Amino acid sequence: MNRRSFYQRVIIGLGALINAAIALPALAYLFLPGKQKAAAGWTDAGSVRALPTDEPSELTIQRERQDSWKTSVEKLTVWAVKKSDAEVVVYSPACTHLGCGYRWVDDDQHFICPCHNSAFGKDGAVLYGPAPRPLDRFQTRIVGGRLWLGPVGLDEKA
C-alpha cells in the first residue's frame, strides 16, 4: 500500500464516521418512539372546609411543570367556587380570549378580564366581551376533605 491509497482510505473512513455521527441521531429521532409524556400529576389545593360556600375564592398553589427534559415548580393562582362539601369548581387563571389574568368583582358579582373587557359569571359562562368560550376548568377530586387539582379539562369526580 502506498501513501496515496493510505490517505484516501483515511479520508473515506473519516467521512464515513462524520456521516454516521449525523445520520444515526436523525434516524433514531425518526424511527424510535419518543419519551412518553408523564401523566399529569394532581396537586393539593387545600382544605375544602376552608372555602366559603358559593363564593369565588382565590387560591395560590404550587405544581410541577414538565417542559421536555426540565421539571420546574410554578406558582399558580386559581379561582375556586365551592358548591357543597362534595363539589368544588376550580377555574384556570387565564381568560379564554387571550390568556390574560382576570379577577372577581364583588360589587358586580362576576369575573372580569381588564385587558379586553370580557366578563364571566360565577359558573364560568361568558356574560359579555370577546371571550369565545367559558372559563377553562381544572379536573377536581375531593379526598379526605382535601381538594386536589388535575389537568385543565372536563371535571372528573373520584
Image (tube, helix red, strand yellow):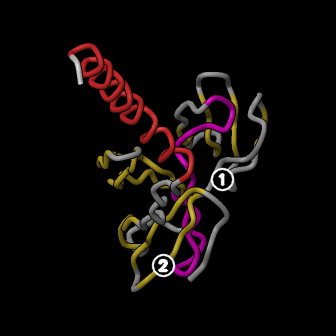
Quadrant showing the N terminus: top left
Give, as a three-letter code, the residue at label 1. Lys
- Viewer-side residue, 109 vs 29: 29
Q: Residue at x 56, y 51 (%)?
A: 31
Image position of 130 (left or right of 117): right
Q: Which residue lies furthest to the top in this view?
A: 4
Q: Which residue is drawn at 55% across and 49% down?
A: 92
- Mark 1: give few (<14), some (14-19) or many (20+) Cα within 10 Å: some
Give, as a three-letter code, the residue at label 2. Ile
Start and end of the magenta stretch? 80-98
Q: Position of residue 140 (x, y in %)?
A: 54, 69
Image position of 8 (left or right of 106): left
Q: Where is residue 72 in the image (x, y as percent from the top left)?
A: 29, 47
| Contact (Cβ within 8 Å) of mark 2 with mark 1 | no
Q: In the drawing, what numbered circle is on residue 61? A: none
| Residue at numbered disc 2 | 142
**In magenta segment, residue 37:** no
Q: Where is residue 146 in the image (x, y as percent from the top left)?
A: 39, 76
- Viewer-side residue, 129 vs 38: 38
When the figure is inspected, residue 76 is found, relative to residue 18, above or below; the finding is: below
Give me the C-alpha separation between circle 2 and circle 1. 20 Å
Q: Residue at x 37, y 72 (%)?
A: 47
Quadrant showing the C terminus: bottom right
Q: Which of marks 2 and 1 is in front?
A: 2
- Viewer-side residue, 67 vs 44: 67
Q: In the drawing, what numbered circle is on residue 122? A: 1
Nearer the N terminus, badge 2 or badge 1?
Answer: 1
Find residue 12 and report its image quarter.
top left
User: Helix or strand or loop: what does disc 1 sit on?
Assistant: loop
